[in-house]
Amino acid sequence: MSGAEAEPGIGAVSALMDAFCPMHVILDEAGTIVHIGATLQKLRAGLPLVGRAFLEVFELRRPQTAQTMEALLASAGVKLHLRLRGAPETALKGVLAPLGGGQGAVVNLGFGISLLDAVRDYALVSSDFAATDLAIEMLYLVEAKSAAMEASRMLNLRLQGAMIAAEEQAFTDTLTGLKNRRAMDHVLARLITAGRDFALMHIDLDFFKAVNDTLGHAAGDHVLQNVARIMVEETRSEDTVARVGGDEFVILFDGLTDCETLERVAKRIIQKLEVPMPFGAHMCHVSASCGTVLSLSYDSPEAAQMLADADLALYASKHAGRAQHSFFRVEMRETSAADAPPEDSIPAAMAPRKSATAPAQNRRKDSA
Amino acid sequence: MWQMHGLINRTIERFVRETRGESLWLRVAEQAELGFVEFEAMLSYDAALTERVLEAVSAALLLPRESVLEDIGTYLVSHQKTEAVRRLLRFGGVDFVEFLHSLEDLPDRARLAVADLSLPGLELDEQLAGRFSLKVLAQPAGFGAVMLGVLRAMADDYGALVILEYFSDVEGEERIEIQLIEEAFAAGRGFELGARAG
């Protein structure tokens, strides 16, 4: 009895394959398709694939050496990567098993990761897949995961919104709506890191303590809110106006280093602040002293140094009789240590956090 | 603390919002003393909140709790805004009977999608031809009533004609008796594998 006779005929094989593998093809010894699974034929509806050469219908991408029927047969058991020629192009995976007795071969195919496109492109339904195929479960998972991801994405968006709001709050001085010390530190660090040219103006209110002491905190708060409004009005939207202490403010002028302009802005702020502010039946009188330092004055500007120097310039203004504006000059570092500042102008909140210059720190110790 | 997944809380919320209106929901949220007006689908909440919300909805709609839960089940499958849920359920089978048989896998399927979403166990018994019994192992009871609404809507979706009977408490379990009169009674709604819920 020869081996060939013991092998089942193509008919028996195709019946089995139809039952289990709707995406198979059976090839004769010449590599011609003699039978095709229903789902595979559905991919080229109206174009009967039986009778055509396997390698004409499918482009074999890997192994690329198997471009003849002999080579194909030799690839038995190896994972095949194929592409259905024509439109729509669909990537397929497969494996070949030779039929006994040189009768040809069976190739079983599957979509692999191209399943999602294929289902859409060919309007496939559940019955197009073998009952044991995990394709439907995969489609289910893709949809379920997409829905879950979308829900998570929405949650993330809302959390991000809440985070931004919280940060906004953490960077805002609640009394005046200006930026706070933390925010100013961040902006200053950013300007320095970015190598921007900018000016830093330190402003300290004069006579504010008197308002607080005689008219009470409500009057003081009212003044601070007015002062904040004036500073915002007199600066550009790209400038940072921050309340850094009780009655101390810092303005960072991004891209503005023209001394005349800065002088003008400072004078105008002082002028407007000096307009008496009505509070109930009373009038509040305040003024301000300002000190300004330019980033251009340093080879490599440092936040603490700039703040300390602006502080010195502010002190010079106080010393010159208040309601003044001064630019920082290096000499101020030497002269400042000797003089004590006037009574109500100790800018406590301006204490640089680290590596302050010696004169500024000494002065603070002296006056404390 | 017993937890209830945000997806379930959110479903109750959306059911009220979308079928009865925003203002009624705000009233429910206040009545239930939520302290917020929107559940997060991907967070979990104290299960006591869910109970309070259900009580408040039931009071506001003048409907018994079970009817509210059944309506929520129907809403889940038939409302246009919850199309994704209907599609995920339809993946369970090509016809209503196959869908019924897929129900025992439902908790596992849900967990595959959202790892911390645990649905009550479901056990399907096929009795005579066309007669099924679905046991719902939920504590506290109530998920069975939701499943009643889901089954009713899914039968419509498949175009099957069924008679459903709900038993709210049978030895600590809920049970739904299902009698399939005609599997292909109506056309039902379409289901394309490749289409996605928008």
Image (spheres, coloured by chain):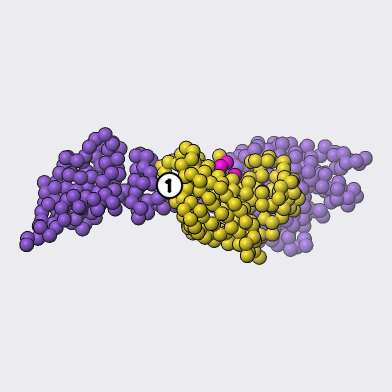
Chain colours: A purple, B yellow
Q: What segment carries the magenta color?
A: B75-79
User: Which residue is rendered at x = 30% and y = 37% of the image?
Assistant: A88
Q: Is residue A204 magenta?
A: no
Where residue A7 appears, as percent x and y from the top left, is: 14, 58
Where residue B183 appears, as percent x and y from the top left, is: 47, 45
The local crowd at label 1, few if under 14, some if 14 to 19, many if 20 or more residues have their Cα within 10 Å, is some
User: Which residue is rendered at x = 17% and y = 44% of the image?
Assistant: A34
* Helix, strand or loop at mark 1: loop
Closest to the observer: A221 or B82?
B82
User: Which residue is rendered at x = 28% and y = 36% of the image?
Assistant: A45
Residue situated furthest front in the rendering:
B128
Where residue A263 appears, as percent x and y from the top left, is: 68, 39
Main structural element of the magenta stretch: helix, strand or loop?
Answer: helix
Residue situated furthest right in the rendering:
A281
Q: Is residue A51 above or below residue B33?
A: above
Residue B115 located left or right of residue A273: left
Closest to the observer: B16 or A271?
B16
Whether residue B107 is visible: no
Residue B61 located left or right of residue B69: right
Judging by the rendered image, the residue that carries numbered circle 1 is: B94
Whether residue A175 is visible: yes
Quarter assignment of residue A287: top right
Closest to the observer: A60 or B167?
B167
Closest to the observer: A8 or A319?
A8
Residue situated furthest left in the rendering:
A1
**Amino acid on which the number 1 mark rests in the picture:** Val
Quadrant for the C terminus of chain A, please: bottom right
Quadrant for the N terminus of chain A, please: bottom left
Where residue A147 appears, as percent x and y from the top left, is: 51, 48
Label 1: chain letter? B
User: Which residue is rendered at x = 64% and y = 41% of the image?
Assistant: B18
